[in-house]
Image: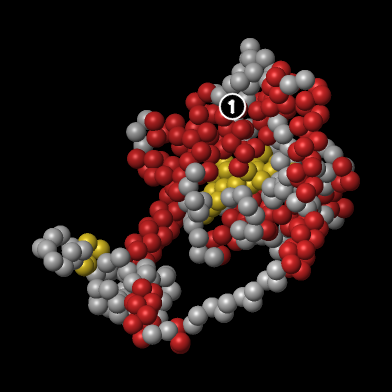
């Protein structure tokens, strides 16, 4: 494990500058002489330096001296607009889907009372007698609320809630030990509040460093906002997959939740038996949640992504050669923020306190 001063830069925010991939440079060396490559590199640096912020400011100053920038036009307001324009803008605003919380009592489109459990229907073409369709203003709100309630009921029926273990029900960011990795805590808090570019977080580190504690804390922040959440260990997830393969409808509903819940915590990835079927299931889960907007995923492991890839490498496959596990690890490197939990072992520290007492 690296020391604090050697700690690599966290990947929750993507770097501003992207380096040229080694394989691209290798291919370029086959078609260009060293002198040509040097000229290309110099030209690239010249173009990059030409548009630095300071130089852009100098160019802007020169242009403004030659041709003064005209005063910005003030944004027109509805107060000064013709009445017909005001009516058109207000009508358009009224026809937008209603938010979850609204003070509007009557739908401006279907003219029925706004309710949480029902919506109206409208004729899409008043000039013809056609099948009525759900009101585009009040129906999206009701459908979203019903879907959220259905997921909440399923979580309660199948798991008794978010499936957070009994020993972790009291864990939160407020109870995270002061001896724990505070940098990791701050990064996890930013992820929980959706302040990061990525919607996936890979927490890894040695045993007892608080990975599950931070993952559960993130899950609780999502649930406190009224969003759905589910905690599940990687071995438990694979058992559910096997039961679904044998025709268990209840377990199939649980897998649907794992694919669609707002925040999923997949704990202890890498402790399971690395079979091709298991790796396939993890790939499908990661790919589905990665490609669906609005879904957040936290994965914890004792292994770094490189070590996880090596652990999944089948016998007889040379290091670096392609295998199915690389499909998962490549997705994690591409779309997940990677956060190593450092510091002391919190479990060992707790045991030491208990022995002293």
Between 326 and 233, the one nearer to me in the picture:
326
Task: Please indicate, yes or no, whether residue 231 appears anywhere in the rendered image.
Answer: no
- Residue 175: which quarter of the image? bottom right
The residue shown at (85%, 39%) is 2
Q: Is residue 22 visible?
A: yes
Q: Position of residue 320 (x, y in %)?
A: 68, 20
Pinpoint residue 176: horizontal percent, then vertical percent: 73, 58
Question: How far across and how far down the image is residue 300, in percent?
Answer: 65, 42
Residue 41 at x, y = what percent?
78, 33
Q: Residues within 10 Å of mark 1 (few under 14, many from 20)?
A: many
Closer to the camera in the image, 282 or 331: 331
Q: Is residue 147 above or below residue 31?
A: below
For residue 251, above or below residue 323? below
Residue found at x 46% / y 87%: 80
Which quadrant, please, contains the N terminus? top right
Q: Nearer the viewer, residue 20 or 112?
A: 20
Q: On the picture, is 298 further left or further right than 42?
A: left
In this picture the colour scheme is secondary structure
Q: Is residue 3 above or below residue 283?
A: below
Q: How many marks?
A: 1
Pick the residue in front: 120 or 116.
120
Please indicate whether residue 303 sits to the left or right of residue 137 in the image.
right
Q: Quadrant of the C terminus?
A: bottom right
Residue at the limit of the structure toward the left, as seen here: 129
Q: Which residue is mark 1?
A: 325
Which residue of the protein is positioned furthest toward the front in this rendering? Answer: 66
- Give SS at disc 1: helix
Q: Residue drawn at (61%, 33%), measured in percent from left and top?
A: 330
């Amino acid at each position: 494990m690296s020391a604090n001063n050697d700690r690599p830069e966290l990947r929750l925010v993507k770097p501003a500058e992207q380096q040229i991939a080694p394989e691209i440079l290798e291919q370029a060396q086959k078609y260009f002489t060293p002198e040509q490559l040097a000229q290309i590199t110099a030209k690239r640096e010249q173009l990059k330096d030409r548009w630095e912020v300071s130089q852009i400011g100098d160019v802007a100053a020169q242009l403004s001296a030659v041709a003064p920038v005209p005063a910005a036009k003030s944004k027109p307001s509805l107060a000064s607009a013709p009445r017909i324009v005001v009516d058109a803008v207000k009508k358009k605003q009224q026809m937008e889907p209603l938010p979850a919380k609204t003070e509007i009592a009557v739908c401006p489109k279907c003219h029925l009372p706004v309710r949480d459990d029902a919506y109206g229907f409208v004729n899409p073409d008043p000039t013809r007698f056609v099948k009525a369709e759900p009101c585009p203003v009040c129906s999206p709100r009701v459908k979203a609320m019903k879907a959220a309630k259905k997921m909440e009921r399923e979580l309660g029926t199948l798991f008794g809630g978010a499936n957070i273990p009994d020993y972790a029900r009291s864990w939160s960011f407020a109870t995270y030990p002061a001896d724990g990795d505070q940098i990791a805590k701050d990064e996890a808090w930013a992820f929980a509040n959706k302040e990061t570019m990525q919607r996936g977080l890979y927490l890894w580190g040695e045993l007892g460093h608080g990975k599950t504690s931070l993952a559960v804390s993130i899950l609780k922040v999502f649930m406190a906002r009224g969003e759905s959440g589910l905690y599940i260990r990687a071995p438990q997830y694979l058992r559910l997959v096997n039961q679904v393969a044998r025709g268990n409808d209840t377990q199939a509903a649980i897998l649907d939740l794992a694919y669609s819940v707002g925040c999923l915590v997949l704990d202890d990835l890498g402790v399971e038996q690395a079979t091709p079927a298991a790796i396939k299931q993890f790939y499908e889960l990661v790919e589905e949640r990665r490609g669906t907007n609005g879904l957040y995923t936290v994965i914890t492991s004792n292994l770094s992504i490189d070590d996880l890839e090596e652990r999944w490498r089948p016998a007889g496959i040379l290091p670096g050669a392609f295998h199915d596990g690389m499909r998962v690890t490549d997705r994690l490197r591409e779309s997940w923020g990677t956060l190593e939990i450092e510091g002391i072992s919190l479990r060992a520290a707790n045991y030491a306190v208990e022995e002293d007492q």
